[in-house]
Image: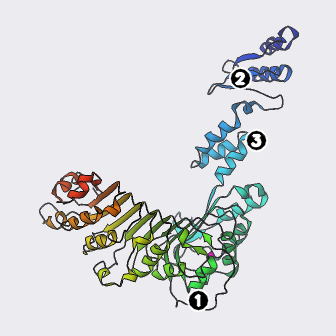
Amino acid sequence: MERIRRHALLTQPPFASLRRVRIDLRSDSIAAEKVFWMIVEKKKLHDIVAYPAHFAVWTNFRPTQKLMAYAYIELVNEIIDHLHDDDLTLKACALVCRAWLPASRSRIFHHITLEGKPGVSALKFPIWRGKTRHIRRLYAILSSTPEIVPCVRTAVIREGMVGREWMVREKTLVPILRMLNNVERFELERAAAMELAWAELPLELKGAVQHLLALPSLREVKLGMLALDDPKELLRILEGCRNLRLLHLYHLRLRGPMSYESIVEKDIPPARVDALIVGPRTSPEVVGCLLHPQFNMDMSSLRRLSLSISGNFAEYARLVSSAVALENLEIIFMSDVDLAAYQALPSSDRFDMSHNPYLRRLAVKFDVIQRQDDPLPWLNALFATFTTPNILEYIHIVYSLYLPEPYMDRSANTTIFDGWQAIDATLARPVLQSLRQVKLEFSLENPIGYGVAPRFLEEVDLKSPRLRARNVLVVEAFDTSG
């Protein structure tokens, strides 16, 4: 108290011209804080230098501000933003003061995942039925504190495996979905490698999902492990997505006949999607549904497209041709694709890159471990379809190979690029003069550990004089097992 009275002299008339004070909060934090506010409120200082134990700040103050306000709330928000993946620290920050609460709360509830958790029996063994107590707790929080609802930007619904299903029996799921009004990213999937039948979900739950998909704020949608009876269901699910920018579909199957007869046409402008990802095990019929005239998304506006090709090529080729504004294309071949049969297809069922004059990056990934077909003829046929004008700059080809034991015959892996010289001639044509890099990358699966990639590159005989002369060819290899 004596120190406080001594420092209080700074507020007397002889110190009327005082505009700058240095306070060392390490000496006596309680006394220094009281002096700090005594000076600020009575003298209205322009500049104050404070030295707490953990940081130093220069700032201007107003008499009504709290002590922590001098640390600039913008800087606090920036620091809290770096803690977006640390829930425990964010919860601690939310309890510091009112000034820190909005920033902490927005990060805590930015991403919510609704899924069943395994319970524990009295004998401490996991039980199969998924527990949803945390979901009911979330509903209570959102109901009692409505200002938290706009903080939820990403919502994930993940159904459990067999014996842990929870979506149908959890009564608070529908109210939670109806409550959300500012979601930007939505995901619906199943945790295990089995499908979620859309037709078997209750009508109120499907309505709540469609309500979420129709939000004006929604920009990204990911649907996976779904089984649909017919294409009309997919059209109804996505018909409300008016501002969608990214659509990600994987393991999506249409198990009924392809019929569009009962769909009523609506005079609504289609959504202009920027990116589309068609993941593994997605039926080619789903791709055909995306191209149907009654589908509410404009594929011609696509700028980024990723295709995991399974089954026939026709629908995928149509999708690539329709994406006339495409800039980035990734093609991943699944193990059930018959590359040898591609050459026998009619021209209308093949890829024709002349429809994509704005394409800048092309990536193709082959899994040679599970397929014996030589992919070089397919690659050469694809590259031959590029015509003028085009601005293709980067080509990335990834090969997944299996290296046998050292005592086994390795010639099959070292001679797989005997036909590369034909591709070298195709890529050296004047119509592809904008090429900056052709990167050939080997992903090596081997049973003898790391360190074989350099020797593999020495063994591969890659005849590419034209690309090497232009200094655009890059060949790399890396190990993926040890």
* SS class, disc 3: helix
Give the mark nearest the N terminus, 3 or 2.
Answer: 2
When the figure is inspected, residue 102 is found, relative to residue 149, above or below; the finding is above
**Is residue 313 visible in this depiction of the protein?**
yes
In front here: 7 or 228?
228
User: Within 10 Å of the Cα at label 2, are there few (<14), some (14-19), or many (20+) other Cα atoms?
Assistant: some
Question: Is-magenta flag for residue 211?
Answer: no
Residue 447, image x, y percentages = 23, 60
For the residues marked 1 and 3, what is the alpha-carbon distance in whole angstroms? 55 Å
Q: Residue at x 71, y 23 (%)?
A: 29
Q: How is the protein colored in the picture?
A: rainbow
User: Within 10 Å of the Cα at label 3, are there few (<14), some (14-19), or many (20+) other Cα atoms?
Assistant: few
Q: Residue at x 17, y 68 (%)?
A: 412
What residue is disc 3 on? 98
In front here: 440 or 410?
440
The quarter of the picture where residue 307 lies is bottom left
Give the mark nearest the N terminus, 1 or 3.
Answer: 3
- Three-letter code, disc 3: Arg
User: Which marked residue is nearer to the observer: mark 3 or mark 2?
Assistant: 3
What residue is disc 2 on? 29
What residue is disc 1 on? 260
Residue 200, image x, y percentages = 60, 83
Residue 241, image x, y percentages = 64, 71
**Residue 313 placement, left or right of 227:** left
Give the mark nearest the N terminus, 2 or 1.
Answer: 2
For the residues marked 3 and 2, what is the alpha-carbon distance in whole angstroms? 21 Å
When the figure is inspected, residue 100 is found, relative to residue 463, above or below; the finding is above
In front here: 413 or 324?
324
Q: Which residues are magenta?
A: 238-245
